[in-house]
Image (cartoon, rainbow, N blue to C red):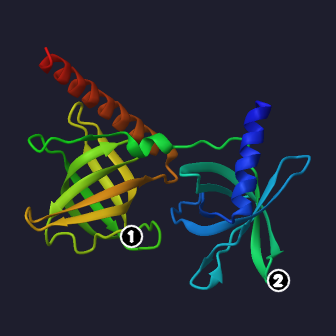
Amino acid sequence: MNANKVSEVTAILSNACERNLPLSLRVVGDGMTEEHHSRFLLLEETKGGGIIIIEAPTSKGSVVLMRPGQEVRVSFSHNRQKRIFSSQLLGRGKVKLNSGTAVPSLELLAPTHLPSNERRGFYRVFVNHGSPIPVSLGVLADRNGPASRVRTREKGFLTDIGGGGLGFRVAEGKSLLLSVGVHVLISFKLPENGQKINLMGRVCFSLRRTDLREVFFGVQFVSVDSEVEYKQGVDSILRFAATRQRESLSKRIEGGH
């Protein structure tokens, strides 16, 4: 890899550790989709590559059990850009903080590449009210992270869509279990070819419109273990959004003559 790219990755990780930035971590390949929260502590450089030391995530007051050799997926925000990388758990230990307190820690293999998905969150097109796209929603039981059990199912209509997420609306009174932070399973069909899209998302925005008797929600897509299906779904959405944008631009140009 280009030496400048490696230096950039090292600089970002070093800064994340210096600032103890928060991160989300998920074990890959064990059928689980739950995300755990942690923070960066230290970056150690070795001959075989760097080692990232993070605080061991906890759940209900206990350290989450993770085994060396497990593959994990890490995401964090740095200078307003979301960074995602895959790594391997090397071991467990304890690290003494500046306060003198020793905390349980995990050692991860440092990545050589830190992709950013900054563009996806802003690449959206609106769905015309006259041509509604129905969406089925499975509200997951675990509010703190994705879980396999669906607590309830709702139906709504898409309001906007893009590679990083989507918006939808539901009738007032049908959204009692939908709120910011809740994870949902999303299913809908693209109108152009009838392709069915199945993705997972986290509700990050809600707005109640009493004049319309509807509630509007914004959802950010969450990657799960079925990475192939996730990427195919997002790629299909990006193509759909690009087509709609070209059509909209063509109409504006034609209307200007």
Would residue 114 appear left or right of 215 to someone viewing this image? right
Residue drawn at x 80%, y 33% is 3
Mark 1 element type: loop
Q: Return the x and y of residue 85 as percentages of the image width and height.
A: 63, 49
From the image, state whether disc 1 or disc 2 is nearer to you.
Answer: 2
Quarter-of-image position of residue 123? top left
Mark 1 vs 2, N-terminal side: 2
Residue depicted at 56% across the width and 43% down the height? 116
Q: Which label is found at residue 100?
A: 2
- The label on residue 128 is none
Residue 141: x and y in percent read 37, 73
Left or right for 232, reference 217: right
User: Quadrant of the image for the C terminus?
Assistant: top left
Q: Which residue is mark 1?
A: 149
Indicate the position of residue 42 as horizontal and vertical percent values: 79, 63
Q: Amino acid at mark 1?
A: Arg
The quadrant of the image that shows the N terminus is top right
